[in-house]
Amino acid sequence: METISAMKVRQNLGEILAKVELRGEEFVIEKGGRPTAVLVPYKKIQRIRERAAQGITKLLTQGSEQNPNADLSDEEVEAFVNQAIHESRQKR
């Protein structure tokens, strides 16, 4: 994964987007010398999100013998996920 400055992205956006779309290249974009964003092919992000959703669905739908949380309501699952996100963000 190549690291590039935000200024270079501004100056060469079309070229960089072509590299991402056509060649599947990935870029870390830095601003002020600090990583700020990542530019990756859209299809890759779609696959990552689909796999994550499948993994979460599988985890939440396993039988109660394997998963004591299998009988949680949608609202309880959402609250559990939101709490986990909140706790993860506090650790940063």
Image: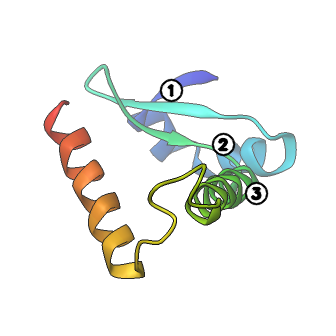
Give the mark nearer the N terminus: 1 vs 2. Answer: 1
| Tag 3 secondary structure | helix
Give the mark nearer the N terminus: 3 vs 2. Answer: 2
- In the rendered view, would you say 88 is above or below 3? below
Query: Do labels 1 and 2 touch, CB within 8 Å?
Result: yes
User: Quick check: 15 left or right of 76?
Assistant: right
Query: Where residue 15 appears, x then y in whole percent?
Result: 70, 45
Q: Which residue is mark 2?
A: 16
Query: Do labels 1 and 3 touch, CB within 8 Å?
Result: no
| Mark 3 residue type | Lys
Query: Where residue 70 appears, x then y in whole percent?
Result: 52, 65
In terms of depth relative to the viewer, which is nearer, 17 or 54?
54
Q: Which mark is residue 59?
A: none
User: Quick check: 92 left or right of 65?
Assistant: left
Which residue is most to the right?
22
Query: Where residue 71 appears, x then y in whole percent?
Result: 47, 71
Q: Which residue is mark 1?
A: 4
Q: Residue at x 80, y 41 (%)?
A: 24
Rate crowding at label 1 as few (under 14), some (14 to 19) or many (20 or more) other CA atoms within 10 Å.
some
